[in-house]
Image (cartoon, coloured by chain):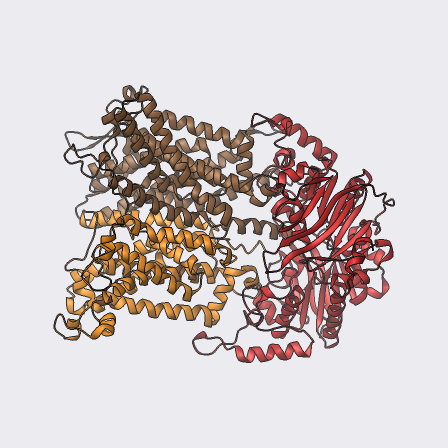
Amino acid sequence: MPRKDPITGKLKWYKSEGAVAVYSALISILIGMAVGAIIVIVVGMSKSNISTSGVWEGIKLVFLGVFSTGRDSAGQLTFGFNGVNIGNMLFRAVPLIMTGLSVAVAFKTGLFNIGASGQYLMGTMGTLSVGLWLGWSGCPKGIAWLCAFLAGIILGALWGAIPGIFKAYLNINEVITCIMTNWIAANLVTWWFDAHETFKNSAEGGKVGYIIPLKNVGVVTPKLLMDKIFSGSQANGGIWIAIIIAVAMWIMMTKTTFGYELRACGANRHAAKYAGINDKKSIILSMAIAGGLAAAGASLYFLSGNTEFYWSTYQKLPAEGFNGIPVALLAANHPIGVIFSGIFMSMLNISGLQLKYLTAYNEYIADIIIAVIVYLSAFSMLIKTILSKKIKHDHGNVNAEPAPAADNKDEAAGVKENETEKGGQK
Amino acid sequence: MSEYVIEMNHIRKEFPGIVANDDITLQLKKGEIHALLGENGAGKSTLMSVLFGLYQPEAGEIKKDGKVVKINNPNDATALGIGMVHQHFKLIDVFTVLDNIILGAETTGALGFLKKKEAREKVIALSEKYGLKVDVDAKVEDITVGMQQRVEILKMLYRDNEILIFDEPTAVLTPQEIDELMEIMRGFAKEGKSILFITHKLNEIMAVSDRVTVLRKGKYVGTVNTKDTNKQELSNMMVGRPVQLEIHKKPATPGETVLKVEGLTVPSKIHKNNAVNNVSFEVHAGEILCIAGIDGNGQTELVYGLTGLEKASAGTITLNGQDISKSSIRQRALAGMSHIPEDRHKHGLVLGYTLEQNLVLQKYKEPRFQNHGFIRFDEVRKYAEKLIKDFDVRSGQGPVTITRSMSGGNQQKAIIARELDRDEPLLVAVQPTRGLDVGAIENVHKSIVAERDKGHAVLLVSLELEEVMGLSDRILIIYEGEIVGEVDPKNTTPEELGLYMSGAKRQGKEGEANA
Amino acid sequence: MVFLLQQMMLYAVPLMIVALAGVCAERSGVINLALEGIMIFGAFMGVVFVRMFQEGGWTQDQGQLIMLISLLLSGLCGIAFSMLLAFSAINLKADQTIGGTALNMLAPALVMFFIYMIVQQNTMGMAQGGAAGWFMIKPSTFGYPKGYSFGPIGDFFLNKVYLTTYICIIIFILVSIFLYKTKTGMRLRSCGENPQAADSLGINVYKMRYLGVGLSGFLAGIGGFTFSMTTANMTSNGDVAGYGFLALAVMIFGNWTPLNIAGGSILFGLFKCIAATYSTLDINGDGVFALNEIGISPYVYRMLPYVITLVVLAFTSKNSRVPKAEGIPYDKGMR
């Protein structure tokens, strides 16, 4: 938030912590896309089947893929408002926003939720199974939708709670337990669907290996005007639900005593415990909420009516789970920011697909850009430090009694101890 | 040949926002014990780190035997024969004593393989020559703090250092161990080694040093011969104004029992024995009861057991007649216990939170500060502003300052403000003055005495003997997790306390309750 | 039985070497979550090099040489890739978990991008032939006829094995000795426990951490190559089936010490091997595929390594000896 300078009365945007976060995110994005463009150039130059104009087209699509409208009769790339692309972007943003929220909420409690993939899969299982059951049972579609949505969330929350329990009671690093539970979930889900033939889509040819889509039983998220605005796209009301959930998370984390407790646990578990906060409960709840959010992403994705689930997933974890990490990092773990970063990541994916369809390149360039952005979140820390140092400098020495940075060994030791806790025991 | 073996002239060292050393000069003669005196934050450690090559000064020069030298890193310092025993020992816990001593100065054979046999013989010879008894094959984590210090000293001797820096070496030792250390230091000096002795304890300076250099707030105050000065003068030089060395308080008027602890036992996280073993005591309204002892004898765990931070395996705790042995941390706090924790960064504060958020850390759930789970930010702000004013907590941006950016003294003030404002019948204060300067210490002591005079019970845990003697109305001594004696501060001496603290003396079981 | 043991070794050896990779980094104080990514990258580069040799006209007779050179080059590529982690963790003092995660995302993205650019499909194999044909040690390698038996012990060591198994075991032993018996190894370990102490003794913490991460990259790189050759027929598809993460689990399970890791790898290798081969596994040689006939779902076997990791972690967490300074960036200014 911008603050008014008490002396000059000028608004100082750049000084606020939020602004610094936005700047560093933008810088990360720019560098990430530049790396993508460089790879496009270097690969284009070294491949004989890609001409100079092909390279240039590749670069244009990296940056503007979402506005691509295909090729004109002369074979030139054309750009403009593409309702299908933008609608699809919003549609694909939904699971990314939800897994991003999942990672962000856990982060605020000091936990690195790398288990969103597994939670996402459990959500998929819950939503598809309950949705199909209730769809067949003939119960009202609205209730079936709600139950399917909630079933996914509950299953995801329970799954997310497992690493939380390991962390809270045994102090085992959540990263390793999340990775293990991811693979267990992948096997469990495959096992479940393998064992229940009724869910498998055997009616439609070419759909072998897929689960019957929920639209076949009419359990589908309402479009809420999105089909009118972005006609021809997959967009639906899911994006509104995701935005509402994000706002709710923001309120929960910043305005409530519950959020105060969670963040206290994240910032300093020992101090939270000292203050009488039940640190174990907070950790488990936080992971359960994270799991529920990731699962909600899966629920909304499969309730959309235009997605199908390939059930034999035991060798492959859904990318949405891991992509929640860059979404959260780019948003500096701010729930509202996650909406934008989720949409941005989705845009990159659309660009990647345009590259695949329209050029000799392929969609993995988008993944490279995303990975670079995650890597750069290290860099963004650096930018933040530099910017905030500048802020402190501008303010002058405000401490009546300056913090003895170097000489107070207690202090250094104390800070270190907190960090040790963060590094934690595995 | 210069008169001085080491000269540090006009040293200046800055850190962002602070000048840690401002034009400081220190001259060390060969074979002398030179004390470096100053409060916490005066710049002593920074100056020594400059000498040891850990920091580079912005201005000034260092001379060894009259020649200007450049010390870029600890290797350079070692090459010049400078060694240092750091206040927080620089030891690798999981390595053996021998490995710790040779680390960084290893002898190796072909392909970089370690050759430990000669090293071992040298270490054993040194340890015998100077009476520094160590077990070379024990892991550092298994040996006592005293032995760890001997390992640090052996590290210097192993490197044939001639200039030995001791940074606050006595903080972790009993009075008897301190005497031994002083003897060892005198021995080194007699051999021609030169010693820099960093401390803020005046008694030790008077006992062992030849000369004293005093620093204050990063500036050089002066150098005096020990035999030409006295404690009061040194103390004034250190603080910059006359200081009351005594704590003034009225005699205590103990009332009813507020806290009653019976048979409290807390298992240790480090070793198999109990950290606190069958401890019983009472604290009365209107008295300050102090638990004295050497660090690591179960004080921390005793407090954890009392406050609920750790589970006790046996015993009952009664607060105001209410059994709280099985209660949660919050229930205990609500039953009437406030707690100034030992480690303000670990337990006392959420450093990433703002000052106001920290000030309501114990109260955010009270109806005053929340409405159906939503925080009432305006009330929090009002309350924080009141505490900041009442307790004179200074910070850059008032209630919204991130506590990490505050000075240690003000952080401690914030904690004390928060805990004292709760106005509970029992105050548990653990090392409340750790790392504070003299002015801040005076304030904390006054606050604690005022708390007692209000009729509250105070349980004080302190490692500082002067604080124990000056502040408390009754002293219990803890040794290896057991209460080994109870004494009246008016009728005891530091030496007697030392005997209890080192386990050399203990009162009989029967005497414990009513001695 | 020989078959089972050999299969087990094929799964255990990459785990062992990659878990040791984790030890090298973590003993120096850097959490290397990127083992998976480095393996993926190493495996991909290994396939690329093998293809280059094949396309350069090297023949099947030079199989072992091609394999050795490619193995070494994969290791070097692993070092190069791991330097990204080292730079962010050591110089930028970034969160090591996030840095590692970034590399785990970057490796498959890069690898898939280039595989598509090179072969226009999602898996890249050798230019011709298969791993078994080119690199496996068989009776024919020694000039014996097909089907020749060296006896049970001889068969275990010499028949249908890969040279990498022995190379990895030797490297494993050498690196373990390096860590515990040499000056540099001791200094490296000190940086993972108490870098402030190491620094005060004139040890360059940054250098030691770079060494630890680099060594880690090398071992994970050759681990990736070995994995792709022995269990994926020398193909690369941007995936090593979570092996890097499993290696992390083995490292924790083995308490950061080589000997325990060797034991842990063999145990996990056994489970992995059962999961992969249970349906054709003839344990006692009576022609009955016992595990298949019990009727337990294959997913149970596939889940088992992960479930066991969780259970073991739950029971051993109290005694685990994490390098104390791991994960904490070392800042010379913050002493």
Q: Does the rendering let one see residue A182?
A: yes
Q: Quadrant of residue A207?
A: top left
Q: Quadrant of residue B392?
A: top right
Give the drawing colour for chain B: red
Whether residue A38 sits left or right of residue B409 in the image: it is: left
Q: Does the rendering let one see residue B81?
A: no
A56 or A165, nearer to the observer: A165
Q: Position of residue A95 (x, y in %)?
A: 34, 34
Give the drawing colour for chain A: brown
B143 or A389, nearer to the observer: B143
Give the total of numbered labels. 0
Q: Quadrant of residue B193?
A: bottom right
Instruction: Give the residue at x 44% y 51%.
Output: C88
A27 or A21, nearer to the observer: A21
Q: Position of residue A149 (x, y in %)?
A: 35, 29
Whether residue C70 sits left or right of residue C20 in the image: it is: left
Q: Is residue A73 above or below residue B411?
A: above
Q: Position of residue A89 (x, y in %)?
A: 30, 30
Q: Is residue A139 above or below residue A283?
A: above
Whether residue C212 sits left or right of residue B328 in the image: it is: left
Whether residue A127 sits left or right of residue B233 in the image: it is: left
Q: Position of residue A176 (x, y in %)?
A: 41, 50
Give the drawing colour for chain C: orange
